[in-house]
Image (cartoon, coloured by chain):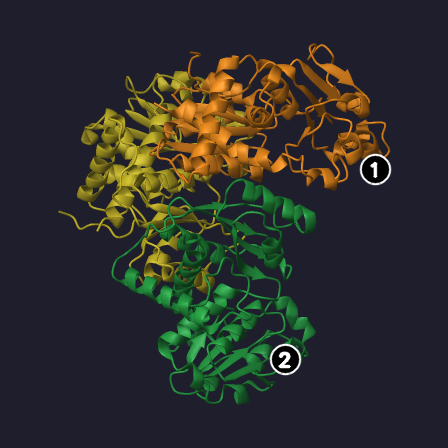
Chain colours: A orange, B green, C yellow
Amino acid sequence: MSPRLRHLTTLENLPRETIERLLDRAEALRDACAHGTRKLNVLAGRTVLNLFFEPSTRTRTSFELAARRLGADVINFDIGFSSTSKGEELFDTLHTLEAMHLDAIIVRHKHSGTPDELVHHAMSGVSVINAGDGNRAHPTQGLLDALTIRQHRPDFENLTVVICGDIKHSRVARSDIHAFSALGVKRIRLCGPATLMPAVEEFPHCQHYDDFDAAIEGADAVITLRLQKERMASTDLPDEAAYFTRYGLDQRRLALAAKGCLVMHPGPINRGIEIATEVADGAQSRILEQVGNGVFVRMAVLNEVLAR
Amino acid sequence: MSPRLRHLTTLENLPRETIERLLDRAEALRDACAHGTRKLNVLAGRTVLNLFFEPSTRTRTSFELAARRLGADVINFDIGFSSTSKGEELFDTLHTLEAMHLDAIIVRHKHSGTPDELVHHAMSGVSVINAGDGNRAHPTQGLLDALTIRQHRPDFENLTVVICGDIKHSRVARSDIHAFSALGVKRIRLCGPATLMPAVEEFPHCQHYDDFDAAIEGADAVITLRLQKERMASTDLPDEAAYFTRYGLDQRRLALAAKGCLVMHPGPINRGIEIATEVADGAQSRILEQVGNGVFVRMAVLNEVLAR
Amino acid sequence: MSPRLRHLTTLENLPRETIERLLDRAEALRDACAHGTRKLNVLAGRTVLNLFFEPSTRTRTSFELAARRLGADVINFDIGFSSTSKGEELFDTLHTLEAMHLDAIIVRHKHSGTPDELVHHAMSGVSVINAGDGNRAHPTQGLLDALTIRQHRPDFENLTVVICGDIKHSRVARSDIHAFSALGVKRIRLCGPATLMPAVEEFPHCQHYDDFDAAIEGADAVITLRLQKERMASTDLPDEAAYFTRYGLDQRRLALAAKGCLVMHPGPINRGIEIATEVADGAQSRILEQVGNGVFVRMAVLNEVLAR
């Protein structure tokens, strides 16, 4: 059995077995919830702290719910988001929190690598969970996306998955690629404007597309990414309407995919920019399932790193 | 028996029986608390979320206390108050929260009707409780005011109640009128500057007054409303002192009311504007009883909508 | 036995016996925690509210953890920090909170004396705990500093303790002096730039120093205070480097102290201003022990004021 995780900062290089264990546990929690279990007690007496240097009410709330449903206490450590806490100042904060006997720190930070720096500098048994760092990783998002796909298309080896949008700056895309690759997906197609695509060397096993129509053909799942509006300027597209024409997921494009292709988005969605309203709200949309799975995946991760 | 409420967005058109059931339950909770019960367990495992698009620490805290004393978990979803979340964006937030398996959403929003829109768009069994929407309704305030009056003057049919101030823009006044009317109060007198009075057609069964001395004569309860200072400009009154002279509740005016007339205010009070300090702090003031009743009424409402 | 405290606003004039009882209880809680006890239930059903008019995430979090580990519910009452709530407005807030049946209010305010004003105006059995008021008192900091010293140097009568920095404006220094004096410390040395020193009359039993080398000679514990950078201007020191040269604690100076001298700081530290990095992170540093003791001391205080 792969060793128990003490931290979760990235999915990169995680064994398939570990990822599958987390997905299995998330599924078991989902089943328990469906049968009426609202709250478990496995983390009673443990304290989890949200250390968000970037605001994200949705993700913070998902982690808070996950921790509470396992019986843990949750502290929201409200640092000013204007603070660019790093270096010694950040580590002093870490050590202060450790001295208060916290069990886990859930961190979001705009600088890639901050969660690993916390792991490296930690002096106690505290667990660090990455809730998104820079462009680098958002591992619980990668897990929840994998769980959502597995629920409907468990045969990963034979899947074609498309990720479309600003992949270059997307920690979601990176964690998705790591999760899907580890689970055996052979055809991962990346699509977006040239200036928003990662270097080919970064993901040599993925196929790069500029044409969304070509990318989506026969796909089993398509993940559209949220466009940060300030990124528009770096493309050669004149406006959001032009972006939607080239990279938006509408009904016509979805019809090019395999029958029943899963429509996914990490949220919050920009309707009419990266996804059409009728697709976001349509029968193939798994967007709200993703949100629901997010809580179960985070419960699984907290349980993994904190269980005695 | 009137059917159990699943949501509470307004008191308008609620049956008297439903309102009385909520008041009876609030009273039972108050009695239990007086006998030492600090916390119940009836909502253990349920999660309640505060979704406040307008800041209101007092009301949010009252709901948070109410939910916790019933054993529920409470999440404060800290949306930026600058956000004018509405339409699709608001419903996407709603659906995201529903996907996280929340049991109740307590919403405050500056737009009248937002809580009903949430009810209309909800896709799960989530309960929506209105904590104040625009000028329209603040149903738990209406209930707590009714409870406060009932405690001292249970004979609603024979009461004279005065509401004084900016009634036109007051969700408190509207919910009070709905509650008192349903409970059988026959003499509801509304008083305020002409530009801050509602249209006569809105409450044809209420008596309209411009002269506070005339309105308060023989009254059993008087509710003074907080003056939003920016409203002053729309009156023909030169300043706050002039407002106080015409519409402030002082000892002289209170002496015109019935003996033991209840003095009420939804808080926070503006001393020397709508109420004199000696009246706010005087023997007839029920202002702090209102605050205490607020917690019990909110417990009763949460219990009503969430009990299995 | 000294009477049980109902409030804690200052350590000034507290009997030695009371302080020792609190330290003993904090130590017992620390021992229980070291043996695996994560959460007690002694304050189940009680509600503690953080009323912070100055932001302090660290102190607020320490109190929140302390209260939760005793089983209490904690409400963070998020008043805007721009508000200069005082006088009637402050007392109306107090009375509103009391009407909601809170058990304890933990208050931080920039005006010295605010916690005592709350005690004076309270109308219920609510307990008030000072989390720092102006320049006056920060009693739980005084207790945690005393606990940290006692752990290593229990023989208070024979200790030499140095406090260095902006003592004039420091509530930490004042509460430290009160705690150490009550516990029998005979040699308390105060050191700092002339403009940042208290009047000699305020602490006639303390020795005043301008020369840190002289002050630290033979000391058993040295507490360096955080320099509020805006205070620099009132000194005759040209910049932070000059401050460090005169009043910073570095290895050379620490070598002048007694062997094993405890290095303490209330945090957060300014490295290279009041303390050198190698000293802050060195073997003699007790800074993180102070943080850990902070939680246990606050548990002891909450237990003292709230136990039935």
What kind of element bears circle 2?
A: loop
Circle 1: residue type:
Ala
Q: Position of residue A139 (x, y in %)?
A: 56, 23
Q: Furthest residue to the front?
A: A259
Q: Does the image show residue A4?
A: yes
Q: Are marks 1 and 2 on the same chain?
A: no
Side (left or right) of B248 relative to A188: left
Q: On residue A75, which mark appears? A: none
Residue A264 in percent (x, y) is at 66, 31
Q: Chain of mark 1?
A: A
Structural crowding at the residue carrying mark 2, measured as other residues with C-alpha within 10 Å and reported as few (<14), some (14–19) or many (≥20): many
| Marks 1 and 2 in Cβ contact (< 8 Å) | no
Q: Quarter-wise, where is residue C259 in the image?
A: top left
Seen at 76% across and 16% down, the residue is A208
Q: Nearest the camera: C255 or B136?
A: B136
Nearest the viewer among C162 and B164 is B164
| Residue holding disc 1 | A241
**Left or right of A5, for residue A287:** right
**Letter of the chain that mark 2 sits on in the rendering:** B
Report the residue marked by disc 2. B193
- Quarter of the view holding residue B212: bottom right
Indicate whether B131 appears above or below A30. Answer: below
> Is residue B33 shown above or below C243?
below
Q: Amino acid at mark 2?
A: Pro
Residue C11's spot in the image, x, y percent? 28, 45
Dot 1 alpha-carbon crowd within 10 angstroms: few under 14, some 14 to 19, many 20 or more: some
